Image: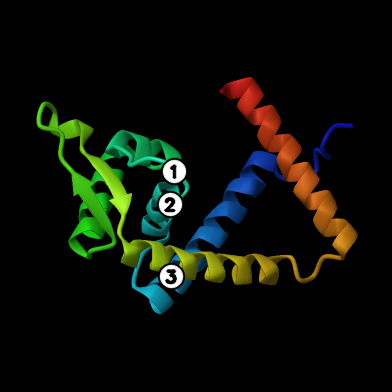
Amino acid sequence: MPICENTPPLTSRLHQLSKLIEREANARYQAELGITHSEARILAATEGSSAALSVVELARAANIDKSQASRMAARLVERGLMCRTSDSQDERLAQHSLTASGRALHRRITRIAHEFDNMLVATLTPRERMALERAIGKVADATVTTFG
């Protein structure tokens, strides 16, 4: 069944929703933790990896550009939340991992993110929440399959 032509395109609505959520998440992380939403994504990408990550891998995992990932990683290293291990042959291959402080901060980020998620879906019934989860999963899978 096609989407109603009287409504804005789904991609536009999803983009707008994503920006609103990102702006609010950024405000919450700044106020409570002193970090940006993008820095939180870098920490999450690092925590979610079984090995240390290069800047290119951090950028890909956090869905940000390489130069932004590089600047954020440097700030997080400076703050003692990540450690950086240089590659003697190629500086671009330096690896980043979380420190104990970084892992502790990531746990706080996760708590805030779950509280925020719960607030976002509070108006939905349990059945609607499950339907939303399934629909998001199907659209995400189709997008990955179609566009890589």
Residue 94, how many percent across, how many down?
A: 20, 38
The disc at residue 29 is 3
Q: Are marks 1 and 2 in contact (CB under 8 Å)?
A: yes
Task: Report the quarter where the N terminus lies.
Answer: top right
Q: Amino acid at mark 2?
A: Glu
Whether residue 47 sits left or right of residue 126 in the image: it is left
**Residue drawn at x 80%, y 70% as measured from the top left:** 123
Mark 3, other Cα within 10 Å: few <14 / some 14–19 / many ≥20: many
Q: Secondary structure at mark 2?
A: helix
Count of numbered tags: 3
Tag 2 residue: 47
Task: Report the quarter where the C terminus lies.
Answer: top right
Mark 2, other Cα within 10 Å: few <14 / some 14–19 / many ≥20: some
**Mark whose residue sits in front, 3 or 1:** 1
Tag 1 residue: 49
**Residue drawn at x 19%, y 43% as measured from the top left:** 85
Whether residue 138 sits left or right of residue 1 in the image: it is left
Q: Is residue 9 visible?
A: no
When asked about the image quadrant of residue 137, the answer is top right
Nearer the N terminus, badge 3 or badge 2?
Answer: 3
Whole-angstrom CA distance, mark 1 to mark 2, is 6 Å
Residue 10, how many percent across, how many down?
A: 70, 41
Q: Amino acid at mark 3?
A: Tyr
Q: Is residue 43 visible?
A: yes
Residue 82, how many percent across, how many down?
A: 27, 56
- 79 or 100: which is nearer to us? 100
**Residue drawn at x 53%, y 55% as measured from the top left:** 19
Q: Secondary structure at mark 1?
A: loop
The disc at residue 107 is none
Q: Amino acid at mark 1?
A: Ser
Mark 1, other Cα within 10 Å: few <14 / some 14–19 / many ≥20: few
Nearer the N terminus, badge 3 or badge 1?
Answer: 3
